[in-house]
Amino acid sequence: MAVKKNNSQELVALLRRMWLIRAFEEKVSVLYAAREIQGLVHLGIGQEAVAVGACGQLRVDDYVYGGHRSHGHAIAKGADINRLMAEIAGRATGYCRGKGGSMHIAAKECGFVTATGVVGGTMPLALGAAFAAKERKKGQVAVVFFGDGAGQAGPFHESLNIASLWKLPVIFVCENNGYAEFTPLSAHTKIERLAQHAKTYGIPASTVDGNDLLAVRGAMSEAVTKCRAGQGPAFLECLTHRLRGHYEGDPAKYRELSQLAEWKKKDPIARFTRLLKSRKLISDQAVESIEREARGAVEQAAEFSLASPWPDAAEVAGQVTA
Amino acid sequence: MAEQTYLEAIRAALREEMRRDPSVYLFGEDVALGGPFGVTQGLAEEFGTNRMVNTPISEATVMGLAIGAATAGLRPVVEIMFIDFITLAMDQLVNHAAKLHYMSGGQLKIPLTVRVQCGISGAMGAHHSQSLEAWLAHVPGLKVVMPANAADAKGLLKSAIRDDNPVVFIEHRALYWTKGPVADGDRTVPIGQAALLRQGDGITIVALSSMVGPALAAADALAGDGIAAEVIDPRTVSPLDVEMIVRSVKKTGRMIVVHEAVEQGGIGAEIIARVQQEAFYYLDSPIARVAAPFAPVPAGPTLEKHFLPGKERIIQAARQAVSKG
């Protein structure tokens, strides 16, 4: 399923998808502040280009695994925002019937297999899906999203080693947002670019501007093509930044305001919009309507979620085993 | 009906299940070479190294890989060479294998079998001799089985592989070369069903895995004293077949629980708690445990012998229980 380079309809669709994620997460933030959503919620506002640039290159039957900051990955892979919002709000109509929540989203129907609350925890899972895909020989690939914090965990290194050794069709997408929880990456490792680890294990790797949708899309397209052709794994490091704290409610005092301001200038949605406008691929009016439609869809998702029933009490010990 | 060793029965179950279902794959260190005890000998020759997959020494990631393969339609078996190393894979086993079905609201199933051998044999010391079944039984979403003879090993392994949940199948190294009758053909043993091995009305002895043999020998000796012991092997530690044990205790009024794992926090504590809840007023004496001391397993052969519970301690505990009340 080759993607035509710079097909204008496709590019506008990508902008629309980024807006859907942005509007969704901004609404989650509002609902969280209003205590309509509780628990631990990690938003990826500012990182939308990675999710959309990467998932835009995938088929429905490709496998995607996320981390604790994965609302965007699920939406980018095609998750229904009503069921997703309901899940985050703990309602019975959620994808996981209110048992997963923000950090453990699964939307199997669209190939978003699962997220995880354990940093780097889904990297081995993606290897397994890639193993199954390789045996099935239908050209499927597995993709796993993780942050820079995962780069210092054991399974990160074990996973790169095995993926390389067995030439598995897996693509590692590292969202290097510069912070592992409250701590800058430089305080956790001497390695500035995590793609360097992949090279050590013999995996083709690149580092791209993760706020540049076309850069992510281009690198991902190449990785997916090679992966489907049986050439083994790829590692894509996307330099980006979350514009919110580590979790909702985190005052993020560890981050300089000037640094935040710099990254706001590089907002992936604004950047991509400017690019589309400069190429005359989209009008001001169309941009406005994309944002309006996204916010409208998200409002409906919120209404659907908050009107949905809470799970039945009997669910508490249901589905412990299949 | 043929005599088979416990080890051969496990191999036969693997072979038959791999023939029956092409989605069964085995992952582990040296499994394509037969493994350190020869359990998987010959399987790579029959099924190829695509399905008998040798892995690096990366327990955490291999466990996660098998879980991921299960989410993508395979029915993997993972071999962890010694249960002591399951510690390295606990994150994946506990946080993903056990919980993905629940956390996904039933969207995902994890038909994973973890084969692992445990226990004391051959003075291997604290890192190659533990019994950790109680840890695993504490985790909702995991099933845990511990066969004590060849027939149960074969039947339970088949059930484990066919189960749509993660099942930890704990083999005991000291039992690998013990022989027992194994019925021909495709016989499964249901998970969650205990076995009544000997009937009696004087005392109930619940014994697990390597302790089943000594418990039966102790029952023989106790018969000489006029104590008719009933011997039950739970076979599965999660979910426990409490019903059979309770029924027995209501008849005998006395019970001892025997396991090789250390006493504190062992599965015996759970069995006893459940029994006293269901049969408190039937008890004629306190329930005793025969288990290892609360210490790591010592390496030297003489200390190891002191550590390991066995027939004599079972006889002593049973006599004590009968003499009270």
Image (spheres, coloured by chain):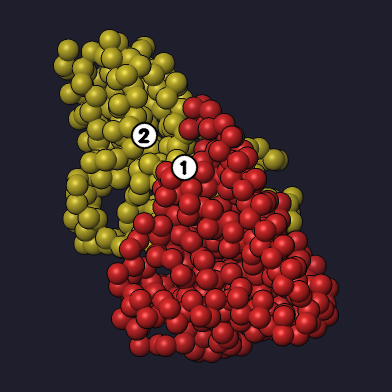
Q: Is residue B165 visible?
A: no
Residue B13 vertical placement versus A265 (above, below)? above
Across and down, in percent, residue A239 comes to 51, 81
Binning the other alpha carbons within 10 Å of mark 2 as few (below 14), some (14 to 19) or many (20 upward) gives many
The numbered disc on residue A159 is none
Residue under the point 32% across and 57% down: B129
A127 and A210: which is toward the camera: A210
Amino acid carrying label 2: it is Ala
Residue found at x 28% / y 33%: B269
Q: Nearer the viewer, residue A282 or A158?
A: A282
Q: Which mark is residue A36?
A: 1
Q: Which mark is residue B207?
A: 2
Callout 2: residue from which chain?
B
Horizontal relation, residue B122 to residue A122: left or right: left
In the figure, the shade used to draw chain A is red
Picture coordinates of residue B51, whole percent (x, y) = 67, 65
